[in-house]
Amino acid sequence: MEAIEEFAKALKELGHPTRLQIFKHLVKAGHQGLAVGDIQQELSIPGSTLSHHISSLVAAGLVKQHREGRTLYCVPQFDALQQVIDFLQDECCSRQ
C-alpha cells in the first residue's frame, strides 16, 4: 500500500462493523487464518453476507485467501495492517 487512496480504502472497509468483526476474528487466529466455514459458524453470519464482506477485505489488501482441498481459508495480512497504522502515525507530533 502506498497511495492515500489505498489507505482510505482499507480504513473504509474496516469502518464497517461486520468487516471489522471479521478482521478482528482473523487477527486473533494469527498467521494461519481461519476457514470461511469456521468464521461463518463462530460469528453467525449468513454465507452470502460473509462472502461479500470478505471480498471487500480482500480487495483492500487486508485479507488473502487460499484453498486447501475443499476448504477456503482467509488469512489476515499483518503487513498491510501495519502499513495503515504506520501511515496514521508517520507524522505524529511533527508540528510541535
Image: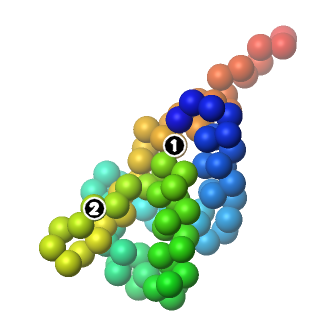
Using the image as rendered, state which of residue 52 and residue 16 is in the foreground.
52
Sequence-wise, which precedes: disc 1 or disc 2?
Answer: 2
Occupied quadrant, residue 36:
bottom left
Q: Disc 1 marks which amino acid?
A: Leu
Can residue 40 be seen here? The reply is: yes
Asked which colour scheme the image uses, the reply is: rainbow
Between label 1 and label 2, give the one nearer the viewer. 2
Query: Does residue 65 appear to the left or right of 86 in the view shown?
Result: left
Residue, far right: 96
Q: Kindly identify the residue that appears in the image at 15 percent across and 73 percent down.
A: 69
Residue 91: x percent and y percent? 71, 20
- Which quadrant is the C terminus positioned in? top right
Is there any visible trace of residue 24 in the rendered image? Answer: no
x and y, in percent, of residue 76 in the image:
41, 54
At numbered mark 2, what does the secondary structure look like: helix, strand or loop? strand
Which residue: 49% across, 51% down? 62
Taking 93 as reference, is 66 left or right?
A: left
Q: CA distance from mark 1 to mark 2?
A: 19 Å
The reply to whether the C-beta atoms of the residues labelled 1 and 2 are less than 8 Å apart is no
Report the amino acid beneath label 2.
His
Depicted 5 relative to depicted 48: above or below: above
Task: Give how far across and how far down residue 17 sits, in percent.
Answer: 66, 68
SS class, disc 1: helix
Question: What residue sits right under mark 2 in the picture?
Answer: 66
Please give the residue where the numbered disc 1 appears in the rendered image.
81
